[in-house]
Amino acid sequence: MRLLLAAFVFYLIVLVATLVYALRNGGKDERRGVLTVVLGTLLSQIASEIGPSSREPGWAGLEIDLMAIDVAAFIAFVAIAYRSIKFWPIWAAAAQLVAALTHLAVILNPSVVRTIYSAAQPFWIFPVLAALAVGTRMHQRALRSAMRPPIVE
């Protein structure tokens, strides 16, 4: 139980730090990414508390509500990537796609061990957050280089 709490605290620290960094230093695409992550996180928490998943013991079967949220987040990242000239939304969409596809394992094989399902599915937020942080850093670099006066020889 202590390890689970430590993992959750670590997740919250990484989540908040990345979102604050992206909000303060990112452009429109990064802010849209923050909105997608925040909505996905909040909806996932709500679904875990009051959705169909809350009626059965954790991860006992297909988490259809969480799967729908993951698919919606994937679509949101694809939309961001489609409108953006930046690369990070593609990486975020790819990680989110894997998160959505982990639910497919339970659809294809309902006997998937719930420990594996419960561990594999939430992991994919970390690559999404990494893509968002790297994208924010690259945005800042681009802004700095655009502000630098040209070198005259």
Image (tube, rainbow, N blue to C red):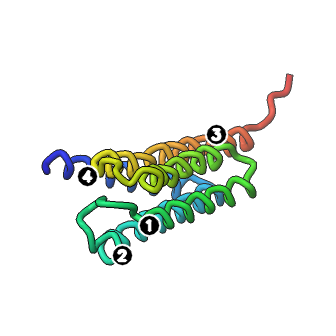
Among the two numbered marks 4 and 2 on one chain, the one whose residue lies closer to the N terminus: 4
Q: Amino acid at mark 4?
A: Val
Question: How far apart in space, not on screen, are marks 4 and 2 (Cα)?
Answer: 23 Å
Disc 1: which residue:
64
Could you tell me which quadrant the C terminus lies in?
Answer: top right
In this view, the residue in front, 22 or 102, is 102
Tell me what residue is drawn at x 80 percent, y 34 percent.
150
Among the two numbered marks 4 and 1 on one chain, the one whose residue lies closer to the N terminus: 4
Question: How far apart in space, not on screen, are marks 1 and 3 (Cα)?
Answer: 40 Å
Tell me what residue is drawn at x 64 percent, y 57 percent.
29
Residue 43 shown left or right of residue 116 in the figure:
right
Mark in front: 4 vs 1: 1
Residue 55 shown left or right of residue 73 in the figure:
left
Disc 3: which residue:
141
Disc 4 crowd rating (10 Å Cα; few below 14, some 14-19, many 20+) is: few
Indicate the secondary structure of the residue bearing disc 3. helix
Tell me what residue is drawn at x 69 percent, y 42 percent.
142
Among the two numbered marks 1 and 2 on one chain, the one whose residue lies closer to the N terminus: 2
Q: Amino acid at mark 1?
A: Ile
In the rendered image, the vertical position of residue 57 relative to residue 117, given as above or below: below
Mark in front: 1 vs 2: 1
Indicate the secondary structure of the residue bearing disc 2. loop
